[in-house]
Amino acid sequence: MAAEMRARRISPEAGRALEILGHAIEYLSDEYVEHAEEVRAADPRVDAIQILMRLNREIYVACPVVPGVGERIMSFLRGYVLRAERSGVNPAR
C-alpha cells in the first residue's frame, strides 16, 4: 500500500487524460445520483463509471514513482562512494 501512496511523475498527456476521466466520472456520478431511483450495482451506468475509474487508475499507476528524499540521498551517497573508490580515494577519511 505504501508504494501506491507515493508521488508519481505525471506527464502532460497523462495529466490531461486523468483530468478528462475525472470530469467524466464526476459528471456520470452526479447524473446517476440525481436521476437514479435506487442505487444498484447491476446498473449499466454504474458499470460505465467503474470502467472510467479503472482506466483512471491504470493511467495513474503507469506513471513512474518519484523517489523519496531518503532514496535520493542514499543514491547520491552510493554514487559518491563509488566515484571515490574508482578514483582511489578512501571516502571514510
Image: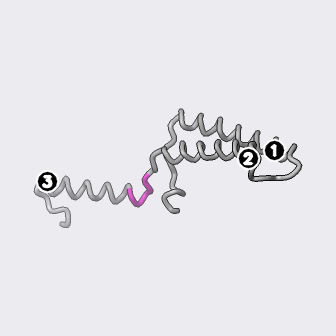
Residue 87 coordinates in the image, percent (x, y) = 12, 53
Mark closer to the chain start, 2 or 1 = 1
Identify which residue is drawn at 59% across, 34% down. Answer: 16
Mark closer to the chain start, 3 or 1 = 1
Is residue 82 located in the magenta-colored stretch of the structure?
no
Q: Name the residue under label 1.
A: 32
72 or 54, nearer to the observer = 54
Foreground tag (3 vs 1): 1
Judging from the image, what secondary structure is the residue with disc 1 in?
helix
Picture quarter containing residue 26? top right
Judging from the image, what secondary structure is the residue with disc 3 in?
helix
Q: Name the residue under label 3.
A: 86
Classify the position of the C terminus by image quarter: bottom left
Disc 3 to disc 1: CB gap under 8 Å: no
Q: Name the residue under label 2.
A: 46
Identify which residue is drawn at 60% across, 43% down. Answer: 56
Q: How far apart are marks 3 and 2 (CA)?
A: 60 Å
Disc 2 to disc 1: CB gap under 8 Å: yes
Foreground tag (2 vs 1): 2
Residue 68 placement, left or right of 28: left
Foreground tag (3 vs 2): 2
Instruction: Look at label 1 and name its amino acid.
Output: Tyr
